Image: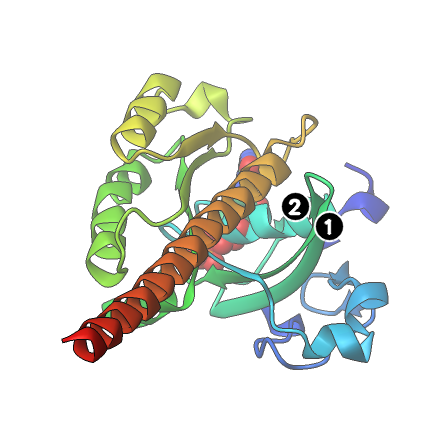
């Protein structure tokens, strides 16, 4: 990889508060890494006051053991680039807009810290509408943590069966693989969610974006269904009240 292609990104450079103004994209020299840092944002979109004020339609949270590549996947999705050097994430939130199936979707993405405690996990789970659970195909332990994470999600979220995608990252390291593709597929089938094996490092096919887009679709589908159910139940309540009144009047 060429020096100028080496994107280093440190979490402290990013706005942690989703409401804060985003930095303008550009290169900044970082004395610690002696590489250029790329400040991440889509300035053209988010600098518009009307858009800044609009609350994001879809809130996505990325979970997984420390080091599985959560930040790398988020950055790949947002910038189509791979970051080699990084600081372990404390917690970063990004705003992004994408066109999915000819519809503009505004999203907020929370890149969680792999080492957060139970309370933080639960609060992030309550916050999110949809979830990416990531494991590293070269780390069996990270795969074993997927089940408990999903269990916690099911405990925290109501209604259950939350929108979810399972991602097996670092597929470029096939020689060091500890988790088979079929194992990932089987687990995803058990969890009734979509499965993607991909690499934040080598993503020629755009699988990373595909995973995020599919999650957005799933969130929007569920929201649409919930909206219809809510509308239907409120119509039913009105009908029942009218019937009651009519019965009283006629008796
Ligand atoms: N080869 C390879 N390395 C990757 C890939 N994704 C991430 N990495 C590397 O894995 C390491 C951890 O990546 P991060 O994105 O920081 O992992 P994380 O899950 O966000 O880690 P925490 O912030 O500590 O929770 C870094 O050295 C990345 O360069 C990948 O797809 N392939």
Residue 180 disc label: none
Q: Nearer the viewer, residue 81 or 238?
A: 238
x 82%, y 74%: residue: 47
The quadrant holding residue 58 is: bottom right
In the image: residue 115, left or right of residue 60 = left
Badge 1 is on which residue?
A: 79
Q: Residues within 10 Å of mark 1 (few under 14, many from 20)?
A: few
Q: In x, y percent, where is residue 95?
A: 65, 65
Query: Are the residues flagged by discs 1 and 2 in contact, CB closer than 8 Å?
Result: yes
Q: Is residue 175 left or right of residue 39?
A: left
Q: In the rendered view, does 53 fall on the left or right side of 191?
A: right
Asked if disc 1 is less than 8 Å from ligand 1, the answer is no
Label 2 residue near ligand 1, CB within 8 Å: no
What is the quadrant of residue 121 in the picture? bottom left
Secondary structure beneath label 2: helix
Whether 213 is drawn above or below 78: the answer is: above
**Mark 1 element type:** helix
| Residue drawn at the location 65% of the way across and 71% of the way down | 14
In the foreground, 241 or 81: 241
| Residue 202 point in image, percent of width and height | 65, 31
Quarter occupied by the N terminus = top right
Task: Kindly identify the residue that appears in the image at 77 percent across and 60 percent down.
Answer: 38
Residue that numbered label 2 is attached to: 76
Q: Quadrant of residue 142?
A: top left
Q: Position of residue 53 (x, y in %)?
A: 69, 79
Separation of disc 1 and disc 2 at Cα?
5 Å
Please give left or right for residue 25 compared with residue 129 in the image: right
Considering depth in this image, is 147 or 226 the residue closer to the camera?
226
Residue 173 in the image: above or below residue 119: above
Neighbour class for label 2 at 10 Å: few (<14), some, many (≥20)? many
Q: Could you tell me which residue is drawn at 28 percent across and 60 percent down?
A: 157
């Amino acid at each position: 990889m060429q020096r100028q292609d080496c994107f280093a990104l440190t979490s402290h450079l990013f706005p942690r508060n989703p409401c804060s103004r985003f930095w303008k994209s550009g290169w900044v020299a970082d004395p610690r890494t002696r590489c250029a840092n790329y400040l991440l944002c889509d300035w053209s979109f988010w600098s518009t006051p009307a858009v800044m004020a609009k609350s994001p339609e879809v809130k996505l949270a990325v979970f997984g053991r420390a080091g599985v590549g959560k930040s790398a996947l988020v950055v790949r999705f947002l910038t189509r680039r791979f970051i080699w050097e990084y600081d372990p994430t404390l917690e970063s939130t990004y705003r992004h807009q994408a066109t999915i199936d000819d519809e503009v979707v505004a999203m907020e993405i929370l890149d969680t810290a792999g080492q957060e405690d139970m309370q933080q996990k639960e609060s992030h789970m309550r916050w999110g509408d949809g979830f990416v659970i990531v494991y590293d195909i070269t780390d069996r332990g990270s795969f074993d943590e997927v089940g408990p994470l999903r269990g916690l999600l099911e405990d925290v979220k109501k209604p259950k069966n939350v929108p979810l995608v399972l991602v097996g990252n670092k597929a470029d390291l096939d020689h060091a693989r500890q988790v088979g593709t079929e194992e990932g597929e089987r687990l995803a089938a058990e969890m009734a969610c979509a499965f993607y094996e991909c690499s934040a490092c080598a993503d020629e096919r755009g699988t990373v974006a595909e995973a995020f887009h599919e999650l957005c679709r799933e969130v929007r589908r569920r929201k649409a269904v919930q909206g219809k159910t809510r509308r239907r139940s409120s119509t039913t309540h009105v009908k029942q009240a009218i019937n009651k009144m009519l019965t009283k009047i006629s008796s």
